[in-house]
Amino acid sequence: MEHVRKRPSMYIGDVGTRGLHHLVYEVVDNSIDEALAGYCDTIVVAINKDNSITVEDNGRGIPVDIHKKEGVSALEVVMTKVGAGGKFDKDSYKVSGGLHGVGVSCVNALSKYLKATVYRDGKEWEQAYEEGKALYPVKEVGISDKTGTSITFIPDDTIFEQTTVYSYDTLASRMRELAYLNRGIKVTLIDKRSLNGDGTHSQEVFHSEKGLEEFVRFLDKTREPIIGKVVSMEGERNGIPVEIAMIYNTSYNENLHSYVNNINTHEGGTHLSGFRRGLTNALKKYADNSGMLEKLKFEILADDFREGLTAIISVKVQEPQFEGQTKTKLGNREVVSAVSQAVSEMLENYLEENPNAAKTIVEKIVLAAQARHAAKKAREMVQRKSALGGFGLPGKLSDCSEEDPESCEVFLVEGDSAGGTAKQGRDRNFQAILPLRGKILNVEKAMQHKAFENEEIRNIFTALGVTIGTEEDSKALNISKLRYHKVVIMCDADIDGSHIATLILTFFFRYMKELIENGHVYIATPPLYLVKRGVKRQYAWNDKERDAIIKDYGNGASVQRYKGLGEMNAEQLWETTMNPENRTLRQVSIENGSEADRIFSMLMGDEVAPRREFIEQNAVYANIDV
């Protein structure tokens, strides 16, 4: 337990907001394991007033009898010994969620205070802990006719120094995901930190009867389907439970989300390879037999079959082997054939039984192949000139003199005027400037070849030294020659600037996701105000800061509102936004792949109704920027 407190990142990933929320997921995963074993169907997660968390389920309750080997209650062993939970006992659970099963003992070690309450055998038991150490032996505190476990914990602020404040939205998206992945389970999330107008707390109940089928519908709510129903199946292949749901839409993106034991494997792995293989085999066989490919002058490739596809692949593996940079890539070889067989069978049956939908899918594939062919020509135009040694770099790029990519950063700046100021203000040793003219293309609505024909997008590819597309996969990204390890989006702090930043982020999410996943993408935060009084001057990044400075300065303070980066001089821009000593850069990360995909398609896609609904729910007041 001491080791967990000394090296928390080894166990929960990091000690920022992601690690903080991971504590909740570890406790909830215990309850989900009970549900997978058939003993629990209700889980309640509460964010309490003091920002502590309570997770309660109606499972069997953690055993409280004396552990033969340890000589203390089994509850105390589970809560205070790393790796002592049911996950490490093959007889306890057939499969188990939770990354590497670090479990509730790590949550205990990283909590200032934790209390476990167990309801079983008609009694109520409890034990409390501080920093992972038991304060007293497990004791019986009453009688109870219910069963289950309740865990309340307060994260340790000496470990989570950045913040110990939980985000309702982050927890909600994970609880929703768990409800879809484990159909029939009811997960309730309650926020007790604030009251609604009617005196109740904000809460949502996540429950799905159809599981992945409903999950696909939820993710694709903002896109237009081209086939009527979701294609889905579940079953066991080679002893591995496999569940799949998929649908085709009018978009040009491929959206595959894969899970192993409820863990989002955003780096993919063998289950994703199996899905792709099964999909390609079944669709190619049908397309060849249909005669619809005869007029095509070039061969169809694997990724043509996946354009406009949204799919979720969920497998349960008894002993998953994870690899990859963030340990979220499945390595079990036996999973490939299990998933491939399942997908082939499911699709072959569907295509036979639904000839009209099958024809629509093949037509979409043919269009995708034609578009890929056009995109290849456009892409070759981007990559014809080598970015090596500065030859062929965009004329607008003001490069830096340092050649080690790890030390270099590039600012993507909105507009030529701000670009000029940034060039004057930068440190030319390690900071490069690429001005972008106007709003770049919205890639969410554009075919791939249109993106590569767009001058601003071509400039970004060339400046970064990143290439896209291989013979096998037209969307594969090669970042081995990335010229800058920090790519900073720097836009005006107004509505237009936010829109441009969102367009650039959409482009990165759809075409260069690896840059985000590897932590290379940042957003600059220029100040909104400069408050002056006499020789005193101070910058403010929001209205609250501005008001506090005005109050501090007293009467006679004047406020300058920066409408855009171009309104600052070079020295001010360096001082506030570009100087590594003073600036605040926000690193862009993907907390939840399926949720990010849904939000981008809603904000930037064709469907207006979901976007309108989102604006109505989230706009506290209309802010008209004239």
Image (spheres, grey):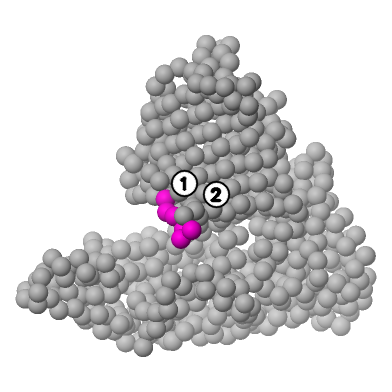
- Taking the spot 47% from the left edge, 80% from the top edge, the residue there is 459
Q: Label 1: how many residues lie within 10 Å, few (<14), some (14-19) or many (20+)?
A: many
- Looking at the image, which is closer to me, 470 or 164? 164
Residue 410, percent from left and from top: 37, 71
Q: Nearer the viewer, residue 547 or 502?
A: 547
Q: Secondary structure at mark 2?
A: strand
Regarding mark 1 in the picture, which secondary structure is present there?
strand
Q: Nearer the viewer, residue 74 or 337?
A: 74
Q: Is residue 606 left or right of residue 385?
A: right
Please state, as top left, top right, bottom left or bottom right, where the C terminus lies in the image: bottom left
Question: Which of the 4 image quarters holds residue 534?
Answer: bottom left
Amino acid on which the number 1 mark rests in the picture: Ile
Residue assigned mark 2:
189
Which residue lies at the image location 70% right of the left edge and 38% below the top edge? 36
Q: Which mark is residue 47?
A: 1
Residue 19 drawn above or below residue 65: below
Residue 174 in the image, given as x and y percentages of width and height: 57, 51
Q: Does 453 appear above or below 234?
A: below
Q: Establish if 156 lies above or below 312.
A: above
Q: Amino acid at mark 2?
A: Leu
The residue located at (68%, 27%) in the rendering is 92
Residue contact between numbered discs 2 and 1, judged by CB atoms under 8 Å: yes
Region of the chain picked out in magenta, as a range: 193-198
The vertical placement of 325 against 501, above or below, is above
Which image quarter: residue 51?
A: top left
Judge whether residue 280 is colored magenta. no
Q: Callout 2 environment at 10 Å: few (<14), some (14 to 19), or many (20+)?
A: many
Residue 240 at x, y percent in the picture: 77, 41
| Disc 2 from disc 1: Cα separation | 8 Å
